Image (tube, rainbow, N blue to C red):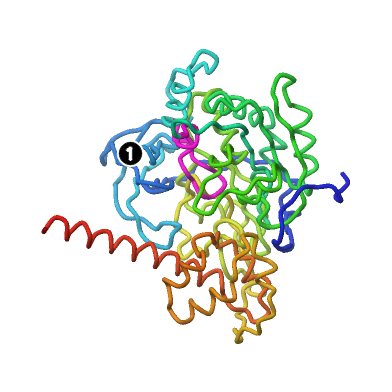
């Protein structure tokens, strides 16, 4: 493919891809662990509400927690077993959150109980959306936003195009890559169902050009009656971010504070779309996902199908364990992922990868004063001034950061990556965004209290 004519966006960075460790490795199914830990909070929005109690026996695929609102998602048992407890457990966020512990039945064949498989051909758009909602499908690219919400845009907001994100621009990760190579038919079926829900007539699938086998697989299996185009994109980070992908594929800019639907687009991750197809092929909800376990600190990198709720420690052991110089375990990719503080934290619906870095990868670097070189401005994909925002963050001027469009920051890490002074700009901005949200919540609560006392 001629890279001179590949679509892309302005700015961004080119970190080492490091995908060679697992890009050619077929997906392998991980055996069931002895115990599962299923957090009630493993999606964007309101945590789910438990509907089981200790001592209850559950089958694989049974609902164990119901969605608590529209922007929420149910949780299902990913193996047959007995509910041990509902208690605080280690969470990938670094805190402890309420989770349902299930002791997996050791001699079970793990065959789900018979269930009605919905025939999508005869269902209305609303019925399809409800089936996706009941299946607990969320975005599998990391954000874990409930998919049914995306499928039902507000009244009067027409969706012209559905865009599938097959970029997987984070270094090391190959989850989406292997999904496209091994399950391209599912990607197309899920795409067809989503298009029907949204009333979209056209679809685009953007795949970075370092995945030629994925592009070939999608093109080879594309149904003749489906209005979809598979496009190769420049290999650049963060090509897979929604706003960057829309700009690269259809040259439209999502307005500040807006959403893709403001430009007539819905963006969905290819793995999420394949999961939608699986719901209508098997009747099973989202109870397992593909996870890339990789990095220089793991002995045998793999792409694994993993039951949701499996502890990270179990994945590492299944891949031969840690190397002697392993120093840090990161959930997700190294650019936007989070360092894991407890290996007993479980795989959740949004867990894309487990990247193990060595001491040489994470050795401490001395931070120096900003030299105003401007590299962070040239790297920022949303055209912010990270140098100015970093200076304001250092002085604790949160309101001024907000006035300088901190809300647009994706915390993608591009500015930190290129900074010759090793200033942790992205981390500073993430903390500032959290502080601003908490400040707004406090002000809202004070306003509500004042109104109640008036």
The image quadrant of residue 432 is: bottom left
Q: Which residues are magenta?
A: 135-153
Helix, strand or loop at mark 1: loop
* In the image, residue 423 above or below residue 38: below
* In the image, residue 70 above or below residue 282: below
Q: Pick the residue in front: 283 or 37.
A: 283
| Secondary structure mostly seen in the magenta stretch | loop
Residue at left offset 53%, top offset 59%: 408
For the image, the number of numbered tags is 1
User: In the image as oriented, which residue stretches furthest toward the top?
Assistant: 122
- Provide residue 267's location: percent of width, then percent of height: 59, 40
Q: Is residue 119 magenta?
A: no
Q: Pick the residue in front: 356 or 84.
A: 356
Residue at left offset 37%, top offset 43%: 103
Residue at left offset 53%, top offset 54%: 256
Residue at left offset 64%, top offset 38%: 164
Q: Pick the residue in front: 25 or 111.
A: 25
- Provide residue 250's location: percent of width, then percent of height: 69, 42
Q: Is residue 147 magenta?
A: yes
Q: Which residue matches tag 1?
A: 69
């Amino acid at each position: 493919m001629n890279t001179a004519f590949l679509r892309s966006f302005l700015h961004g960075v080119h970190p080492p891809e490091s995908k060679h460790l697992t890009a050619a490795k077929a997906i392998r199914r991980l055996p069931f662990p002895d115990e599962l830990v299923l957090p009630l909070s493993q999606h964007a929005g309101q945590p789910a509400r438990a509907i089981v109690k200790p001592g209850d026996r559950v089958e694989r695929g049974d609902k164990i927690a119901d969605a608590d609102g529209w922007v929420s998602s149910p949780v299902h048992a990913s193996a047959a077993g007995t509910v041990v407890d509902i208690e605080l457990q280690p969470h990938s966020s670094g805190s402890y959150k309420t989770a349902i512990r299930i002791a997996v039945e050791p001699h079970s064949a793990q065959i789900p109980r018979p269930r009605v498989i919905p025939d999508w051909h005869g269902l209305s758009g609303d019925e399809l959306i409800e089936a996706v909602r009941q299946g607990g499908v969320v975005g599998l690219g990391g954000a874990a936003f409930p998919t049914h919400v995306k499928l039902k845009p507000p009244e009067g907001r027409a969706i012209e195009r559905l865009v599938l994100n097959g970029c997987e621009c984070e270094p090391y990760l190959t989850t989406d890559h292997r999904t496209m190579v091994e399950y391209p038919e599912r990607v197309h079926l899920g795409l067809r169902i989503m298009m029907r829900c949204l009333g979209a007539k056209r679809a685009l699938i953007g795949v970075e050009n370092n995945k030629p086998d994925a592009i070939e697989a999608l093109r080879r299996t594309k149904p003749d009656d489906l209005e979809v185009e598979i496009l190769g994109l420049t290999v650049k980070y963060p090509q897979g971010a929604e706003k960057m992908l829309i700009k690269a594929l259809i040259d439209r800019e999502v307005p500040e504070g807006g959403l893709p639907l403001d430009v007539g687009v819905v963006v969905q991750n290819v793995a999420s779309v394949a999961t939608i197809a699986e719901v209508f092929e098997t009747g099973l909800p989202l109870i397992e996902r593909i996870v890339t376990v990789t990095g220089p600190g793991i002995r045998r990198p793999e792409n694994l199908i993993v039951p949701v709720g499996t502890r990270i420690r179990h994945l590492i052991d299944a891949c031969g364990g840690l190397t002697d110089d392993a120093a840090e375990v990161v959930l997700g990719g190294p650019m936007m992922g989070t360092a894991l503080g407890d290996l007993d934290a479980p795989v959740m619906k949004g867990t894309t990868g487990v990247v193990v870095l060595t001491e040489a990868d994470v050795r401490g670097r001395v931070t120096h004063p900003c030299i105003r070189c401007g590299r962070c401005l040239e790297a920022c994909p949303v055209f912010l001034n990270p140098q100015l925002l970093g200076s304001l963050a250092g002085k604790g001027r949160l309101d001024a950061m907000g006035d300088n469009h901190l809300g647009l920051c994706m915390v993608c890490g591009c500015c930190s990556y290129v900074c010759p002074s090793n200033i942790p700009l992205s981390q500073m901005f993430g903390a500032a965004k959290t502080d601003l949200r908490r400040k707004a919540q406090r002000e809202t609560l004070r306003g509500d209290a004042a109104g109640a006392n008036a």
